[in-house]
Image: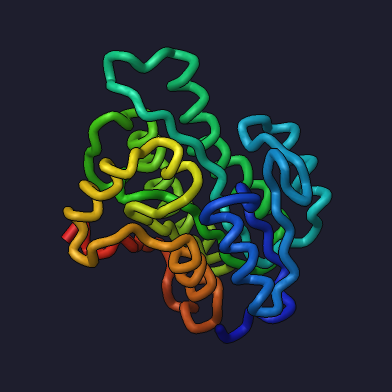
Amino acid sequence: MNGLAGKRVVVTGGSSGIGEATVRRFRDEGAHVVSIALDGDIECDVADPEQVAAALERAGDVDVLVANAGISIRHDFLDIREDEFRRVLDVNLGGVFRCAQQAARRMDEGVILVTASTNGLSGHEHYADYNASKAGVILLARTMARELAPRIRVNAVCPGYVLTPMQRAEYTDEMLAEVNAGIPLGRHADPAEIAALFAFLASDDARYITGAAIAIDGGETA
C-alpha cells in the first residue's frame, strides 16, 4: 500500500484475532506498530481513561490508530445484567472514544480507523448490548470524520462473521456451518482479510475516503 512504510501505527486489541492480523499486516507494510491490549506491547484496559492516557503517552506520536479492542457476550436480551451491559459499552464504545481522542491530540495529520460491525448496521439476536455499542461506534466515527477533517481521516470498518478466537469460543461447529450457509461467499472471513482493508484505508490510496462505514461481510448484508 502507498505511504505506509515508516508510519507510526497503534493498534488496540492487537494481541489476537483481527487486531493481531492487523499488527502483522502493518508491519509487513513497513510501519512501526505498537499493540495496546491487556497483554500487548503496552498493557491497557481501554475502559479505564487513565490507562488509555498513559498508554498513548508511552506510544508517542501516532500517524494511524486502529481502535479495535472489543468484547462480546452472547446472551438473550432479557438475561443481560447491568454490569455486563456497562462493560460491553465501556470497552467497545467508550474504548474507541478514549483512544481516538488521545490519538487525535497527538496527530498533526493522520488516520483513525475503528472496528465496528455489521451488527451495528442491523439487528442480530443475542447481542443487544454489543449491537448497540457498534452502532454507536459508527456514528462516533462519522462525527469525528466531520470534526477532524481535513487534518485527520476517520473511517469505520464493519466486519461480518470473522473466524477469530472470540467467535470460535461462542459458536459450535454446527452454529458456524449454519452461519456460513447464509453468507453468499459461503464462509467466515479470515482476520487477515479485515487487516487488508485497514491497511488500504490507512494508505495514501484511500486519501479521499473519510466518514465511511464499510461492510466487509461476504455479501451477508446484501
Q: Which is nearer the eye, 142 or 129?
A: 129
Q: Is residue 104 visible?
A: no
Image position of 218 (left or right of 8): left
Image position of 4 (left or right of 112): right
208 shown above or below 198: below
Image point 49% across, 75% down: which residue?
A: 200
Q: Which is nearer the eye, 56 or 147?
A: 56
Image point 23% across, 32% down: which residue?
A: 125
Q: Position of residue 136 (x, y in %)?
A: 39, 40
Q: Position of residue 128 (x, y in %)?
A: 31, 29
Most extreme residue toward the bottom is: 2
Q: Quadrant of residue 98?
A: top right
Image position of 124 (left or right of 211): left
Q: Position of residue 131 (x, y in %)?
A: 33, 37
Q: How is the image coloured?
A: rainbow
Most extreme residue toward the front is: 173
In which quadrant is the C terminus drawn?
A: bottom left
Image point 33% across, 54% down: which residue?
A: 160
Image point 37% across, 56% down: which residue?
A: 159
Q: Quadrant of residue 7?
A: bottom right
**Image mark count:** 0
Q: Position of residue 84 (x, y in %)?
A: 46, 20
Q: Is residue 13 visible?
A: yes
216 shown above or below 77: below
In which quadrant is the N terminus drawn?
A: bottom right
Image position of 66 (left or right of 141): right
158 shown above or below 199: above
